[in-house]
Image: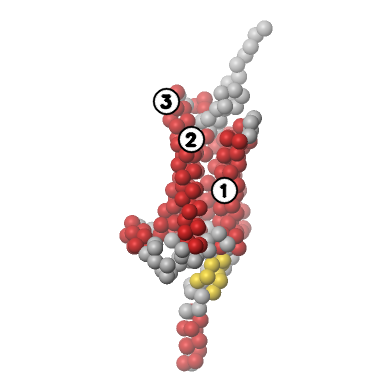
Amino acid sequence: MTLLAIIITNSNENIMQKVLVWDIPTRFFHWLLVASLLAQYATAEWFENAIQWHFYIGYFTLFLVVFRVLWGFVGTHYARFNSFVTGPRDVVNYVMTLFNKHSASSVGHNPLGGWFVIVMLVLVAVQAVSGLFMTDDIFLDGPYRQLADKETLALMNTLHHLAFDILLYVIALHIAAVIFYGVYKKQKLVPAMVHGKKESKTAGISDSRLVIALLVALLAGVIVYVAIDVFPPTPEVDEYYY
C-alpha cells in the first residue's frame, strides 16, 4: 500500500459517517412497545368496557418482550445484550462523563442506557406475566388465575399495579433523558430509532437480518400461544339449575 493510500485510509477512519446501527426489528419492537403501553394505559384508565382489549394487548406485549429477549441473543450486533450490558466499572466511568457536553457518543446503547433497557424489559415482563393472573371480577379471568391460591393472586395483583406505577416513572425518566441528550449533549436519539442510522467513526451493521427476525418472531408467537392458550387449564364453568 502506498503512503498516499495509507494517509487516505487513516483519514477516512476519522471521518464521522452515518452508519446503520438499529436494525428494523429493534426499531419495530421499540415503537410497538410504546404503542402497546399507551394502549394498555388507555384501556385500563380511559375507556370503559375495554378490559377485553386490555387482556389482548397484554398478550401482545408479552410477545414483544419474548421477541426482544430472543433477539438480544441472536439479533444484530448492537441489539445483542452482550454489546450493551456492561459491568459496574463501565457504568461508573460513563456516569462520570455524563455532564460533559463534548464526551464521545456511544454507537449503540451507552453503559447506563444498556442497563436502563434491562430495567424496562424486566418491568414490562413483570406486568405482562402478572397480568395472566388478573380478573375483572365480572366476566374475564387471566389464563392462570385458577392455578394460583389467594396469596399468589394477591402477590400478582400487587406486582401488576406496582410494576405499572414504576413504569410510569421510568418512562418519564426515559423521556427526560432523551431531551437531556438532545438539548444538552446535542445527541439526537429519537431520529436514530426511526431511520436506524447514527453518526460514527466505527462501522455499523450491514443488514437487519430480517429472515432470522421472522423466525424469532414466529418462535416468540408460539411460546406466547402455548403459554396463554395451551398450557393453562380449561376454565371451570359453574352449572346453574333452574
The amino acid type found where label 1 is placed reads Leu
Q: Identify the image's colour scheme: rainbow, by chain, secondary structure or one colour.
A: secondary structure
Mark 3 surroundings within 10 Å by alpha-carbon count, few (fewer than 14), some (14 through 19), many (20 or more): few
Q: In front here: 101 or 234?
A: 101
Is 47 placed above or below 167 here? Answer: above
Q: Dot 3 lies on which element?
A: helix
Q: Given the current orientation, which residue lies at the most extreme right position?
A: 242
State which mark lies toward you, 3 or 1.
1
> Is 36 positioned to the left or the right of 83 in the image?
right
Q: Dot 2 lies on which element?
A: helix
Q: Earlier in the sequence, mark 3 or mark 2?
A: 3
The amino acid type found where label 2 is placed reads His
The amino acid type found where label 3 is placed reads Glu
Q: Which residue is mark 2?
A: 160
Quarter assignment of residue 58: top right
* Cα distance between the residues tagged 2 and 1: 17 Å
Q: Quadrant of the C terminus?
A: top right
Query: Label for residue 151?
Result: 3
Query: Label for residue 33?
Result: 1
Is 46 placed above or below 67 here? Answer: above
State which mark lies toward you, 3 or 2.
2
Mark 2 surroundings within 10 Å by alpha-carbon count, few (fewer than 14), some (14 through 19), many (20 or more): many
**Residue 95: percent from the left, percent from the top?**
36, 60
Residue drawn at x 56%, y 63% is 192
Residue drawn at x 56%, y 53% is 30
**Residue 41: percent from the left, percent from the top?**
57, 39
Mark 1 surroundings within 10 Å by alpha-carbon count, few (fewer than 14), some (14 through 19), many (20 or more): some
**Residue 190: percent from the left, percent from the top?**
55, 59
